[in-house]
């Protein structure tokens, strides 16, 4: 069996630019500050939130919409969002289910899978 070397990035303008920028970045002074995970997550979330708002100026969402729902429905939505709901994938992580798979057999039983 023979594996020929095929340079995949050569001559492709976007890849050449990425390579050049990566080399330039590696030569710059590196920060010695350490960021905690939550701080980094907050910064990234704020950046993407601002970008999303700028791109979706016609969209409006009222925070109090969630508060108009009954408490039980609020809890269900929050649990679906963070994966802490009574689905097999979560139960398997907690050790209360023998399998994380959905009954359909095609995927793990998660909120995304069901939705």
Image: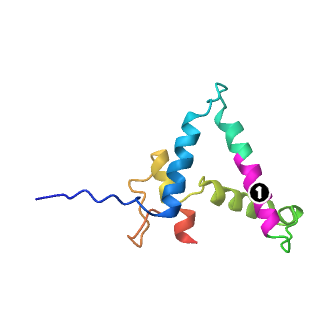
> On the image, numbered disc 1 is attached to which residue?
49
Picture residue at 42% right of the left edge, 69% below the top: 103
The answer to whether residue 25 is left or right of residue 47 is left
The answer to whether residue 103 is left or right of residue 40 is left
Q: Where is residue 70 shown, x and y percent of the image? A: 81, 64
The answer to whether residue 68 is left or right of residue 14 is right
Q: Where is residue 1 shown, x and y percent of the image? A: 10, 59
Picture residue at 77% right of the left edge, 57% below the top: 49
Q: Who is closer to the viewer here, 85 or 24?
A: 24
Position of residue 55 relative to residue 45, above or below, is below
Identify the image's colour scheme: rainbow, by chain, secondary structure or one colour. rainbow
Magenta stretch secondary structure, dominant? helix
Picture residue at 50% right of the left edge, 50% below the top: 19
Magenta span has 49?
Answer: yes
Quadrant that contains the C terminus: bottom right
- Residue 24, image quadrant: top right
Q: Who is closer to the viewer here, 87 or 113?
A: 113
Is the residue marked by circle 1 packed among few (<14), some (14-19), or many (20+) residues within 10 Å?
few
Magenta span has 31?
Answer: no
SS class, disc 1: helix
Q: Where is residue 36 shown, x and y percent of the image? A: 66, 32
Residue segment shown in magenta: 44-55
Residue reaching furthest left? 1
Residue reaching furthest top? 32
């Amino acid at each position: 069996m023979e594996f020929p070397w095929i340079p995949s990035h050569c001559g492709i303008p976007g890849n050449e630019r990425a390579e050049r920028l990566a080399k330039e970045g590696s030569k710059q002074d590196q920060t010695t500050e350490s960021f905690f995970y939550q701080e980094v997550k907050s910064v990234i979330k704020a950046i993407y939130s601002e970008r999303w708002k700028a791109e979706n100026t016609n969209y409006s969402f009222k925070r109090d919409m969630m508060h108009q729902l009954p408490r039980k429905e609020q809890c269900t939505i929050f649990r679906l969002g963070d994966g802490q709901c009574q689905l097999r994938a979560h139960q398997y992580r907690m050790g209360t289910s023998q399998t994380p798979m959905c009954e359909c057999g095609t995927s793990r039983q998660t909120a995304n899978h069901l939705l």
